[in-house]
Amino acid sequence: MSDTNDDGMVWHQKNHYAMWNPMPGRRNHSTQPAAHMTGKVSSKGTKTHRPDMKMPDSQQKRTALALVESFNRMDIPAIVGARTPSCLRHLYPTAMAQAPQDTAAYAKSITSLHAIFKNFSLTLDELIEDTANHRICMWLSARADTAAGEYVNEYVWLLDFDESGKKIVRTKEFSDSVMARDFFPKLKAAMDKHRASTAVNGTHTKGR
């Protein structure tokens, strides 16, 4: 399902994306489609562009979609490898008071989370692409199994790419801070209990 505004931005809902559609001018309200809408051959013999034809994905869009798939496989080398070494990860909202992470710190963080979140998955709800400024924005739904029960959250990731579109140079990541505020203390308590139980069981095993 899609909707088009007067500036030519097409929004595709649920697991699709939005991209600039090269529609000349405003909508054509005529009941007779113009040549550029039907793909008719012009007087010079060149077939004109049809807006309903699927445009090839840009390199940066392919990189963004591959990143989502890497998370669904929890392929940490691929997740980290999508970034440049100097890429900075900024976490929002600012009320979370999280310092930016470079790629090395991000790799350490994502590795520790891998041990906590089982069956982690991301669903892409919307994607908006700004090719001129090498930028993509994604709205994502996340879920995972943890020691404290099911983890469910929503993310908005703003990704800036290098000119090749193959590497991410900066990220701004928003999450549901209310959910994080309520969930992570429960997760910490469950993990502390698990560690204490493991330590006790290990002591009993050694004493036998």
Image (cartoon, helix red, strand yellow):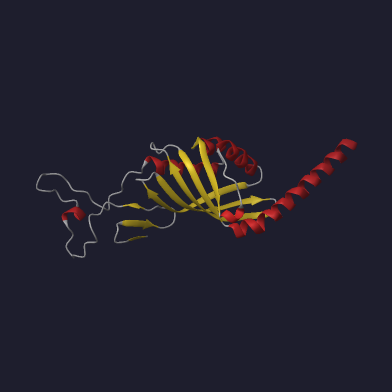
191 vs 207, left or right, is left
Image quadrant where one finds the C terminus: top right
Between 20 and 91, the one lying in front of the other is: 91
80 vs 184, left or right, is left
Between 33 and 63, the one lying in front of the other is: 63
Q: Residue furthest left?
A: 43
Between 59 and 130, the one lying in front of the other is: 130
Can residue 208 be seen? no
Which x, y percent locates residue 196?
Answer: 80, 46
Q: Quadrant of residue 104?
A: top right
Which x, y percent locates residue 6?
Answer: 29, 61
| Residue for point 76% across, 48% down | 192
Which x, y percent locates residue 110?
Answer: 60, 42
129 vs 23, left or right, is right
Can residue 122 be seen? yes
Which x, y percent locates residue 96?
Answer: 61, 54
| Residue for point 30% across, 52% down | 21
Residue 70 versus residue 19 in the image, above or below: above
Residue 88 versus residue 19 in the image, above or below: above
Count of numbered tags: 0
Image quadrant where one finds the N terminus: bottom left
Q: Quadrant of residue 161?
A: top left
| Residue for point 66% across, 46% down | 116
| Residue for point 44% across, 44% down | 160
